[in-house]
């Protein structure tokens, strides 16, 4: 639907005089290899967003707002039944309950606004989506940073009331931690994907929240460190990921494997920033691919409406090999960020946890 709307906007661009449709499209409008998706002039960039980019995002908001209102309502009900809330100060719980209600009402009102006056919503969509993005991410930062060690243990292990403590072998503990880290990282990706913005705005905003997520996971790291079985599992998980990273480095030409001393001594200082970086870079890569696909569709529509000469210079889409290389770069960069944090950043201080 998003790509269809991009194509439709492009067809309209061929019928009305505009800066992008004045002549044949140049052969190199975008430079994906240089991570640049801006059109040659500011006028052409704004024309794209007015005709195609923003309408596609508005269509996505029509279901994203419904989803988030449902998600907040279900999350509020489940939180009331869980023990996570008991692990937070009462004032924090009260503030989070009020924030949940505000987010729910904002999603409902936003969806009604879109349904009743879509043109007005489209004109203010960037500000509304950015406010949603900031509010929901700050909410999750507060939740994660205020969760106690016991709250994190419940979140990761899901113990049954009255059941004896789980006995986990290191491989099983590694799997449990992988699931917990992956689920936690989903929260940092979900809001950026539900309310996407122009990449020039989304990139610094998302990077800031991913950096803030690193210290917010302090309670998670202390929970693992306090449990000998989970700590051994963290070492196993770290070594497995290090093996994958070493294999990838060999593929790209590196012949000296990275030593595994960091995984033995500071596995959590590597794992937590690694997954925060992976959530950040992976999400930005998806947003990059999405914006690139929309702009390529838009430019092809302009080229087709410009005749055979313009059609001959249609920009080409990235090949599967390019996408695979991009995904590999995300993984390698995430591991490099985790390893740098483990070597140079201060270790987690769990004395007061």
Image: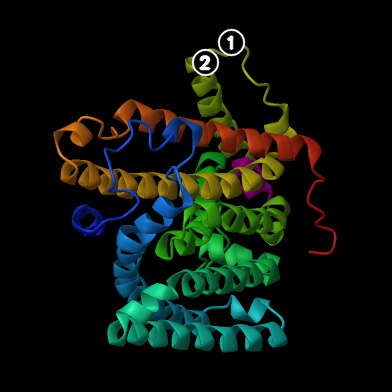
The spot of residue 38 in percent (x, y) is 46, 45
The spot of residue 340 in percent (x, y) is 72, 35
Q: Which mark is residue 177?
A: none
User: Of 122 and 190, which appears nearest the observer?
Assistant: 122
Tell me where the magenta segment starts and ends, as one range. Answer: 227-234
Residue displayed at 34% across by 26% down: 321
Examine the rendered structure and indicate whether residue 78 appears above or below residue 300: below
Q: Residues within 10 Å of mark 2 (few under 14, many from 20)?
A: few
The spot of residue 100 in percent (x, y) is 53, 83
Question: Can I make out residue 266 in this image?
Answer: no
Element type where label 2 sits in the image: helix
Residue under label 2, please give it. 250
Residue 181 in magenta stretch = no
Residues tagged 2 and 1 counted as in contact (Cβ below 8 A) = yes
The spot of residue 26 in percent (x, y) is 33, 34
Query: Which SS does the magenta portion mostly show?
Result: helix
Q: Which mark is residue 255?
A: 1
Res 292 → quadrant: top left
């Amino acid at each position: 639907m998003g790509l269809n709307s991009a194509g439709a906007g492009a067809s309209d661009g061929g019928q009305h005089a505009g800066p992008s449709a004045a002549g044949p499209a140049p052969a190199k409008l975008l430079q994906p290899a240089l991570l640049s998706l801006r059109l040659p002039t500011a006028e052409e960039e704004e024309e794209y967003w007015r005709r195609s980019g923003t309408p596609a995002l508005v269509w996505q908001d029509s279901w994203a707002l419904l989803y988030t209102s449902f998600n907040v309502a279900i999350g509020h009900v489940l939180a009331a039944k869980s023990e996570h809330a008991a692990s937070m100060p009462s004032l924090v719980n009260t503030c989070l309950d009020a924030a949940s209600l505000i987010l729910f009402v904002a999603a409902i009102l936003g969806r009604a606004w879109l349904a009743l006056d879509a043109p007005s919503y489209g004109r203010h969509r960037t500000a509304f989506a950015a406010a949603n993005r900031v509010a929901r991410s700050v909410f999750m930062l507060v939740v994660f940073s205020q969760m106690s060690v016991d709250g994190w243990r419940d979140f990761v292990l899901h113990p049954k009331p009255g059941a004896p403590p789980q006995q986990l072998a290191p491989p099983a503990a590694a799997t449990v931690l992988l699931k917990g880290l992956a689920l936690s990282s989903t929260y940092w990706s979900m809001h950026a994907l539900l309310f996407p913005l122009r990449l020039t705005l989304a990139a610094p905003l998302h990077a800031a929240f991913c950096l803030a997520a690193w210290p917010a996971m302090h309670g998670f790291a202390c929970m693992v460190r306090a449990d000998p079985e989970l700590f051994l599992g963290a070492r196993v998980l770290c070594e497995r990921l290090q093996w994958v990273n070493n294999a990838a480095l060999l593929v790209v030409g590196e012949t000296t494997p990275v030593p595994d001393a960091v995984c033995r001594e500071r596995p959590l200082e590597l794992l937590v920033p690694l997954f925060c970086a992976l959530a950040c870079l992976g999400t930005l890569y998806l947003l990059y691919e999405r914006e690139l696909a929309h702009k390529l569709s838009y430019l092809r529509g302009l080229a087709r409406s410009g005749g055979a000469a313009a059609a001959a210079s249609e920009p080409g889409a990235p090949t599967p090999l390019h996408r695979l290389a991009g995904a590999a770069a995300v993984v390698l960069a995430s591991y490099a960020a985790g390893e740098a944090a483990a070597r140079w950043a201060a270790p987690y201080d769990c004395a007061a946890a």
